[in-house]
Image (cartoon, rainbow, N blue to C red):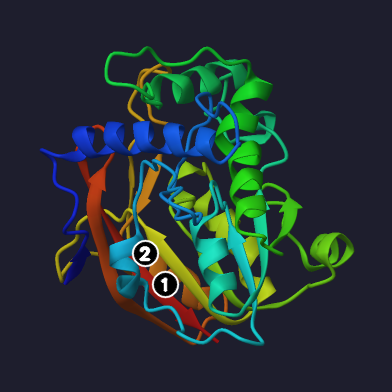
């Protein structure tokens, strides 16, 4: 059964978001953080002192659906595609030593063959909501969007939380024990977390194949999965449409059985559904549902 955030409904998503954005803006100024109006927050994160980021996704009330270990002391954890960093900071709060992986720039983001970086970035710009009810989406260069959506947003939260999460910059395809050892001094991980990242890859099997050798314990995958019947075969549905200007920078949705078989073929002994996370995207009110798989050695 899906874990649902009871505080968010389709009807209240917009109202909640803009109330949170206004509260965040006011409190950040009171705390001397300055004008943060150009930042976007993928995750809702409580930064203390009444400062809560107005995130598009709020996982605070549905964490149980991910079945994370309560005590993570002594564990090395890799969070791939951290965005604002909610899960990286949560792992650290539970005692883990955490490495956060993010793209080195938006020039490295996957794009459909023939598309330019600018075309992909323009689609991302169109997807981001204005930060006030009657506002307009911000105007950003590619470098500015990377900072205000990814690097700057994560760094701001990291400093407010006095976090020791280490940062490694790479595409998921280029992750390797050698590069991680050189960058952060860790080459194997007790737990690897893959949030909603594979849906944004053109080659999800190659992405999984890059991550799998780094995991010596459990890989947690939280992902949009295509519906399936008990009689279905392992399959993957194409979601990118035919118009280069119209996709939401995601292309493939494997079904549960497809993920299970790929993970087992990559060396995981056991793959099981641990839970399901369901909520509403702010401020659009668009409902989402993520199946949570645990793959263990």
Q: SS class of the residue under badge 2?
A: helix
Dot label at residue 165: none
Query: x, y percentage for residue 21?
Result: 37, 34
In front of the other: 271 or 118: 118
Query: x, y percentage for residue 155?
Result: 66, 46
Residue at the image point whose x is 45% and y is 53% from the top: 45
* Residue sticking out furthest to the right: 182
Q: Would you say the residues marked 2 and 1 are in contact, meaning their CB atoms lie under 8 Å apart? A: yes
Residue at the image point whose x is 32% and y is 75% from the top: 64
Residue at the image point whose x is 10% and y is 38% from the top: 11
In front of the other: 54 or 78: 54
Query: x, y percentage for residue 187?
Result: 78, 73
Residue position for label 1: 261
Q: Is residue 205 above or below residue 36?
A: below
Q: SS class of the residue under badge 1?
A: helix
Lateral position of residue 30 relative to residue 179, left or right: left
In front of the other: 43 or 254: 43
Q: Quadrant of residue 114?
A: top right
Mark 2: few, some, or many residues within 10 Å (few <14, many ≥20)? some
Q: Is residue 188 above or below residue 283?
A: below
Query: x, y percentage for residue 292?
Result: 35, 68
Residue position for label 2: 258
Lateral position of residue 141 relative to residue 227, left or right: right
Res 214 visible: yes
């Amino acid at each position: 059964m899906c874990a649902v955030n009871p505080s968010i409904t389709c009807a209240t998503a917009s109202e909640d978001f803009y109330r949170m954005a206004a509260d965040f803006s006011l409190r950040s100024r009171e705390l001397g953080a300055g004008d943060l109006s150009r930042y976007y927050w993928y995750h809702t994160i409580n930064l203390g002192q009444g400062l809560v980021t107005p995130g598009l996704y709020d996982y605070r009330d549905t964490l149980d659906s991910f079945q994370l270990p309560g005590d993570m002391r002594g564990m090395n954890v890799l969070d791939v595609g951290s965005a604002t960093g909610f899960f990286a900071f949560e792992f650290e709060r539970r005692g883990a030593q955490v490495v956060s992986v993010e793209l080195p720039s938006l020039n490295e983001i996957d794009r459909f063959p023939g598309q330019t970086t600018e075309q992909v970035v323009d689609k991302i710009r169109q997807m981001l909501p204005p930060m006030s009810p009657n506002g307009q989406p911000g105007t950003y260069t590619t470098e500015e969007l990377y900072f205000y959506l990814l690097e700057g947003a994560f760094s701001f939260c990291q400093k407010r939380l006095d976090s020791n999460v280490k940062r490694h910059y790479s595409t998921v395809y280029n992750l390797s024990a050698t590069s991680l050892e050189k960058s952060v001094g860790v080459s194997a991980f007790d737990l690897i977390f893959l949030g909603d990242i594979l849906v944004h890859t053109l080659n999800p099997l190659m992405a999984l194949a890059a991550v799998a050798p780094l995991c010596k314990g459990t890989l947690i995958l939280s992902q949009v999965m295509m519906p399936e019947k008990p009689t279905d075969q392992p399959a993957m549905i194409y979601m990118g449409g035919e118009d280069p200007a119209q996709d939401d920078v995601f292309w493939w949705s494997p079904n549960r059985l497809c993920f299970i078989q790929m993970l087992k073929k990559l060396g995981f002994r056991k793959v099981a559904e641990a839970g399901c996370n369901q909520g509403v995207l702010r401020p659009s009110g668009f409902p989402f549902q993520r199946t949570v798989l645990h793959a263990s050695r």
